Amino acid sequence: MKTAVIVFPGSNCDRDLAVALEQVTGRAPAMVWHKESDLPDGVDFIGLPGGFSYGDYLRSGAMAARSPVIRAVVDAANRGVPVLGVCNGFQVLTETGLLPGALMRNAGLNFVSRPVALSVENSQSLFTSGYNAGETIRIPVAHHDGNFHADDETLDRIEGQGRVAFRYAEEVNGSARRIAGILNDTGNVLGMMPHPERAIEPAHGSTDGRRLFEGLLETVA
């Protein structure tokens, strides 16, 4: 499996994501700088990491979504290449239009950094096949702008199409309907605020994130 991680100025979870991918796939990902215009040939998976791209100027993910490499990411996603956006990566995906909605300032106006319980809402996607529907898993969050918002019509459509991948088991940041992660309409793009790359090995306190990458590897391979 050939993977790539996009690196923006201000990314701080790119190495975490790279380490997780190498542990699961046995192959180090290509680290692609935001100014590149192309992705590696034959890439099977693209990761947009967490962090504070461009210092979160204007709004989180807005400037990163206009980086040169993003055009290639959007083209790849539209061809069916799996794309995962974690935290700031989720924000970038909404800014590009690959995912609906927006990530706003947390309801409590505080940075939230702790492990949280998630309910697996969809276990049939490329990313969630390693879980059981209704299962509760624990994955850490670390964000200030993780409050997912969309109008009621969009929320009803996402719910009705089974595109909610993960839901917070408890109130975390004010997200509409406690949504923690959503899929695009074809299921090959996932945006989520929790950090699965930080729940890979026992030393992390949870290995629940590892199953996301293992399930993806098995499905794509």
Image (tube, grey):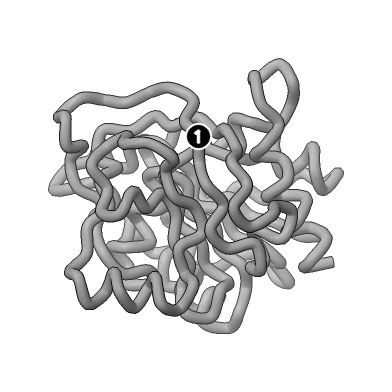
What residue would you read off at disc 1? 117
Q: Residue at x 74, y 54 (%)?
A: 130
Residue 110 on image: x %, y %: 20, 25
Which image quadrant: the N terminus? bottom right
Q: Quadrant of the C terminus?
A: bottom right
Residue 109 appears left or right of 63: left
Residue 32 visible to an observer of this rendering: no
Expressed as whole percent of the image width and height from the top left, the position of residue 42 reads 73, 72
Please tell me whether residue 104 is drawn above or below residue 156 in the rendered image: above
- Report the front residue among 156 and 193: 156
Q: Is residue 156 left or right of residue 139?
A: left
Q: Which residue is drawn at the image coordinates 50% and 29% (left, top)? A: 140
Residue 197 lies in quadrant = top right
Under mark 1, the amino acid is: Ala
Q: Judge left or right: residue 77 versus residue 52.
A: right
* Residue count near mark 1 (Cα–Cα under 10 Å), binned few <14, some 14–19, many ≥20: some
- The number of callouts visible is 1
Q: Between residues 102 and 130, which one lies in front from this camera angle?
A: 130
User: For the point 70% across and 37% down, which residue is it?
Assistant: 20
Q: Is residue 152 above or below residue 8?
A: below
Q: Residue 163: percent from the left, percent from the top?
A: 47, 69
Quarter of image, res 21: top right
Q: Is residue 68 visible?
A: yes
Q: Residue furthest top?
A: 203
The one of 21 and 159 positioned closer to us in this rendering: 159
User: Tag 1's secondary structure?
Assistant: strand
Rendering coords of residue 150 (x, y %): 22, 64
